């Protein structure tokens, strides 16, 4: 027996101590098990796992029965099978306790089977309270609402009450809402996953759902419908800024009637939209990004699995820098550095502090932090090189800079794994900066040519910094 080959042991190793105690009570209960040997078997396995003892079948058997029963492989396998079923039953029961809607549905099913008239009438009287969605967190609640209404139809025997108005509209509407939210949610995920064009998903009825919502505003009164509708528009519609602002109002709790429970995924949709807009040159979305991100920090929803991706960390600091929010950025780095993965923490903190000091024109301090960066990957290496290039230029270290141009181009030539656009962006920064350093002070024609060519070049790393340096060249 071992964790990889035996499903019982695999399941046991996932149980924490409170779960093991609760599971033991279930096994001990005569309602669930009439075989006292199973409890002994459970205790023996748990004890051996905790002490790191081998799980040899005969040794386990001996620790349970001593020598009172001769080892029987068929019986041993029966014990493991029965014990696995009991533990699986415990986990189902534990999960059921955390699913009030599912428990309610099963209760309605029991009433339908038992046909307890008094209790059924009680359910009918209190129906609105029993099926009220007090906290909309997930689309599945509408599926439960659909199932509840189906149960109500059966409990009240509307099939036989042909002259009474039934709840068919409620049954259908709840399913419609679940369908609409699910379609939009799945489509949003499909689009997001296909950002690099390598994952194509064939999802049906999305266009029909969106067209329906475009013409019928009735369903947009449901918060999750509206939220995913606006996210879909943000991803697919070039003229999507009205959708973004409507979504932002819901997300930040500013909408007059719609609210959603904000979480990391909802925040991510707004932030990603801002990043795309910023990449297209719409600088006003830098403020939008920082406003939404600050909201996420205030509500502790800026972190996936309680951590921050180093790349997102850097992007946030960079946006703050371009807005001149130096104090905010430094406070952010020092306050949230422990949310970074431990393996990336030191490098990410030093690089981002270097960036803050660079923007504050504290170039020596920036260099001090860059010296502490270890080049663990090509991205960090190139980002550090681009920042050093700018520092050398700002300090007027022309000799160092000229040598640095050559070494950086050599580095790019060696790393063929870079995408064409990234290679071109870094290479262009080097080439345009080199041309700038070689401009003569009164060469107006050369200056204008360099300025014009840079303006028309799509791929240039640190383009805004370079444009600033070219604009200031003859001042």
Image: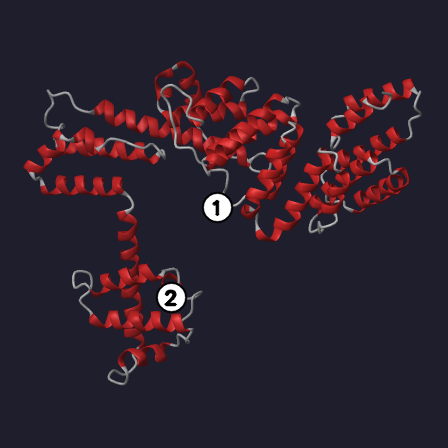
| Mark 1 vs 2, N-terminal side | 2
Residue 377: x and y, percent? 69, 49
Q: Is residue 258 left or right of residue 395?
A: left
Tell me the tag on residue 305.
1
Q: Are marks 1 and 2 in contact (CB under 8 Å)?
A: no
For marks 1 and 2, give the CA distance: 27 Å
Question: Which secondary structure lies at badge 2?
Answer: helix
Residue 226: x and y, percent? 41, 23
Q: Where is residue 238, by image quadrant?
A: top right
Display coloring: secondary structure
Residue 155: x and y, percent? 13, 34
Dot 2 crowding, Cα within 10 Å, few <14, some 14–19, many 20+: some
Q: Is residue 266 left or right of residue 169?
A: right
Q: Where is residue 227, by image quadrant?
A: top left
Tell me the tag on residue 9.
2
Question: Which secondary structure lies at badge 1?
Answer: loop
- Above or below, 49 against 182 in this view is below
Identity of the residue drawn at 56% across and 28% down? 289
Nearer the observer, 92 or 128 = 128
Dot 1 crowding, Cα within 10 Å, few <14, some 14–19, many 20+: few
State which quarter of the image contains the C terminus.
top right
Query: Residue at the left extreme?
Result: 118
Identity of the residue drawn at 48% across and 46% down? 305
- Above or below, 296 against 415 in this view is above
């Amino acid at each position: 027996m071992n964790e990889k080959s035996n499903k019982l042991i695999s399941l046991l190793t996932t149980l924490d101590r409170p779960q093991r105690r609760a599971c033991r009570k279930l096994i001990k209960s005569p309602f669930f098990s009439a075989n006292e040997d199973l409890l002994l078997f459970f205790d023996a396995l748990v004890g051996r796992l905790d002490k790191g003892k081998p799980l040899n079948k005969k040794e386990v058997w001996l620790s349970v029965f001593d020598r009172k029963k001769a080892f029987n492989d068929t019986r041993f396998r029966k014990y493991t099978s029965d014990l696995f079923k009991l533990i699986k039953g415990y986990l189902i029961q534990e999960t059921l306790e955390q699913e009030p809607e599912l428990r309610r549905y099963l209760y309605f099913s029991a009433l339908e089977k038992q046909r307890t008239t008094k209790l059924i009438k009680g359910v009918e009287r209190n129906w609105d309270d029993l099926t009220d969605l007090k906290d909309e967190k997930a689309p599945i609640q509408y599926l439960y609402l659909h199932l509840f209404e189906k149960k109500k139809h059966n409990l009240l025997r509307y099939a036989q009450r042909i002259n009474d108005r039934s709840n068919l509209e409620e049954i259908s509407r709840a399913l419609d809402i679940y369908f609409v939210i699910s379609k939009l949610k799945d489509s949003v995920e499909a689009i997001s996953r296909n950002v690099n064009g390598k994952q194509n998903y064939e999802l049906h009825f999305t266009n029909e759902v969106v067209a329906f919502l475009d013409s019928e505003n009735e369903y947009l009164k449901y918060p999750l419908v509206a939220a995913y509708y606006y996210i879909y528009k943000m991803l697919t519609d070039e003229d999507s800024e009205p959708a973004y602002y409507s979504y932002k109002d819901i997300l930040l709790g500013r909408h007059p009637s719609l609210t959603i429970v904000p979480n990391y995924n909802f925040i991510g949709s707004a932030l990603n939209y801002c990043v795309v807009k910023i990449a297209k040159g719409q600088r006003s979305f830098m403020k939008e990004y920082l406003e939404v991100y600050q909201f996420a920090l205030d509500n502790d929803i800026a972190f996936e699995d309680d951590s921050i991706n180093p790349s997102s960390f850097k992007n946030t600091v960079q946006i703050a820098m371009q807005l001149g929010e130096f104090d905010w950025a430094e406070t952010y780095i020092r306050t949230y550095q422990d949310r970074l993965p431990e393996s990336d923490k030191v490098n990410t903190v030093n690089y981002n502090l270097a960036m803050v000091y660079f923007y504050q024109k504290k170039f020596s301090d920036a260099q001090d932090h860059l010296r502490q960066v270890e080049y663990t990957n090509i991205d960090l290496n190139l980002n550090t090189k681009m920042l050093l290039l700018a520092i050398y230029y700002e300090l007027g270290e022309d000799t160092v800079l000229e040598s640095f141009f050559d070494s950086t181009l050599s580095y790019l030539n060696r790393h063929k794994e870079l995408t064409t656009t990234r290679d071109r962006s870094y290479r262009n920064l080097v080439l345009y900066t080199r041309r700038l350093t070689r401009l003569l002070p009164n060469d107006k024609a050369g200056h204008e040519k360099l300025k014009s060519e840079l303006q028309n070049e799509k791929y240039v790393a640190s383009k805004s910094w370079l444009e600033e340096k070219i604009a200031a060249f003859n001042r």
